[in-house]
């Protein structure tokens, strides 16, 4: 099967590069609204993420089976980028 | 989108009508562990027929207690081994009593002096865990890798949890439809009458996760007595192409109810699959053993109703490779990009199929709160900087 592109990325805003203020990892980010955020990581960015590395130094057990829910520093970087306009947010 | 092979939807340029596109269903079946259901059902001393991966399989328990899965057709004259009998460690063919071992080799032919060369059928790697039987499917014939192992489900073997309430239904469509539910935020409202307030998908490696917190919808609940369900919190992950473990907590006005929900399937063929749901519930002060058992059955019925709601859609819908998404929809394309890794050879798994992708919808954090949070953090950092 062919991997197809998301029609929203073709017709709307693309994913945009963003550096995390904490570790400098470069990810791609897109916001469809103030409440919605998409993040595309590369393996390089994931390797650089401090919170991710801290999370994976644990035993990885627990009910969530070692799930890393996301990086709070990156989340904050995205909020800041959205607020200062670096990552565009479509008007509601 | 660097490095993707992309195909843009072709539209009928003269009419502006959006064309629905769909390639044929894949001719191969996903690489990965597939759950065949409760292992206990295969331990009744009889062989069992399982139609899976476009083939007929036989499951049987050998004398050592282990569960074995073989191609069901005897290599002698093609009879169905699942209609045979278990004799000691071997499965005896109903046609001429040829004896087959769990390793797929013919061990004995009672009326022959020796077994011919090449008397070997396909044997599938099996795994029994937490009361469930799993079979490994790999079109390339490689053994399972340890990193794709199915995680243990703690409550499944603990005394303070109920036994599995397990149900299976045959669904007459390609199994991609059930996978799409991982990302389909909006259908939870329209099809299942829940009200997600927080939704997140994470795809990474062979795991696809859906985190969802939702409120109960008063419009979907008959007014009545008893505890009122306020909502639920769910962390659900597919570990590979077919087995989802959902840590699911129901919030009532007077208690929290902890459960684990399994949503699993195996393909029967390209156009049908067996859909499984399993649930266990933790006992609590408010819900001791009997109450928890009753609740597990009630939830089981509730989940089956949810399946029925999905099936009603699936049996009438068409396969669509180019869904036309609005900004409020979930990451259907990115999920399918992740799912594709199981349908190509390991050597052909591309980075974009396994690299981490996150999609989050958080309606619980108003924009004003974000602004305040950022300002507070900046102020704190500035203060820390002054102290240093």
Image (tube, helix red, strand yellow):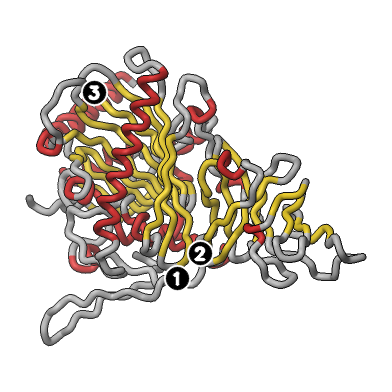
Chain under callout 3: B
Position of residue B176 measured from the top left corner of the image (x, y, whole percent)? 38, 61
- Mark 2: few/some/many CA within 10 Å (<14, 14-19, 20+): many
Instruction: Please report the residue visible at 32 percent of the width from the left and 44 percent of the height from the top.
Output: B304
Q: Quadrant of the N terminus of chain B?
A: bottom left
Q: In the rendered image, which residue does mark 2 sit on?
A: B29
- Mark 3: few/some/many CA within 10 Å (<14, 14-19, 20+): some
Q: Are marks 2 and 1 in contact (CB under 8 Å)?
A: yes
The label on residue B159 is none
Instruction: Please report the residue visible at 34 percent of the width from the left and 72 percent of the height from the top.
Output: B6
Q: In the rendered image, which residue does mark 3 sit on?
A: B252
Q: Is residue B111 left or right of residue B196?
A: right
Position of residue B107 measured from the top left corner of the image (x, y, whole percent)? 82, 58
Q: Are marks 3 and 2 in contact (CB under 8 Å)?
A: no
In the image, B146 versus A83, the foreground residue is B146
Q: Which residue in the rendered view is the most extreme toward the right?
A: B113
Q: Is residue B365 left or right of residue B23?
A: left
Q: In the rendered image, which residue does mark 1 sit on?
A: B26
């Amino acid at each position: 099967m062919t991997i197809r592109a998301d029609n929203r990325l073709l017709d709307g805003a693309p994913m945009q590069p963003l550096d995390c203020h904490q570790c400098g990892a470069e990810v791609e980010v897109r916001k469809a609204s103030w409440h919605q955020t998409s993040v595309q990581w590369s393996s390089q960015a994931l390797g650089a993420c401090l919170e991710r590395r801290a999370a994976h130094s644990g035993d990885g057990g627990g009910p969530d089976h070692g799930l890393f829910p996301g990086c709070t520093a990156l989340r904050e970087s995205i909020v800041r980028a959205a607020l200062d306009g670096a990552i565009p947010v479509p008007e509601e | 989108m660097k490095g993707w092979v992309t195909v843009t939807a072709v539209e009928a340029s003269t009419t502006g009508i959006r064309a629905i596109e769909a390639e044929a269903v894949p001719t191969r079946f996903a690489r990965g562990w597939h759950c065949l259901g409760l292992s206990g059902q295969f331990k009744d001393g009889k062989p069992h027929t399982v139609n899976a991966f476009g083939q007929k399989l036989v499951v049987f328990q050998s004398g050592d207690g282990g569960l074995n899965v073989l191609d069901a057709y005897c290599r002698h004259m093609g009879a169905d081994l699942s209609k045979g009998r278990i004799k000691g460690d071997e499965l005896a063919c109903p046609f001429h009593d040829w004896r087959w071992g769990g390793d797929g080799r013919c061990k004995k032919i009672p009326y022959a002096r020796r077994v011919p060369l090449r008397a070997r059928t396909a044997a599938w790697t099996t795994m029994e865990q937490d009361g469930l039987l799993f079979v490994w499917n790999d079109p390339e014939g490689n053994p399972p890798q340890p990193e794709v192992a199915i995680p243990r489900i703690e409550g499944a073997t603990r005394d303070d949890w109920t036994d599995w309430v397990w149900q299976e239904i045959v669904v007459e469509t390609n199994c991609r439809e059930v996978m799409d539910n991982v990302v389909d935020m909006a259908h939870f409202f329209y099809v299942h009458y829940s009200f997600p307030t927080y939704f997140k998908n994470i795809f990474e490696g062979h795991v696809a996760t859906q985190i969802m917190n939702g409120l109960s919808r008063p419009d979907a609940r008959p007014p009545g007595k008893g505890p009122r369900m306020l909502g639920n919190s769910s962390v659900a992950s597919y570990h590979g192409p077919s087995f989802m473990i959902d840590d699911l907590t129901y919030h009532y006005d007077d208690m929290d109810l902890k459960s684990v929900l399994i949503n699993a399937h195996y393909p029967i063929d390209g156009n049908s699959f067996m859909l499984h749901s399993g649930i266990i519930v933790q006992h609590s002060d408010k819900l001791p053993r009997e109450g928890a058992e009753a609740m597990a059955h009630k939830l089981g019925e509730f989940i089956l109703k949810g399946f029925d709601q999905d099936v009603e859609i699936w049996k009438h819908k068409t396969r669509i490779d180019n869904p036309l998404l609005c900004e409020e929809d979930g990451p259907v394309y990115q999920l399918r990009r992740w799912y594709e890794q199981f349908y190509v050879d390991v050597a052909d798994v591309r980075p974009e199929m396994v690299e981490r992708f996150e999609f989050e919808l958080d309606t619980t954090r108003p924009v004003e709160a974000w602004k305040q949070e950022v300002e507070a953090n900046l102020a704190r950092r500035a203060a820390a900087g002054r102290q240093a």
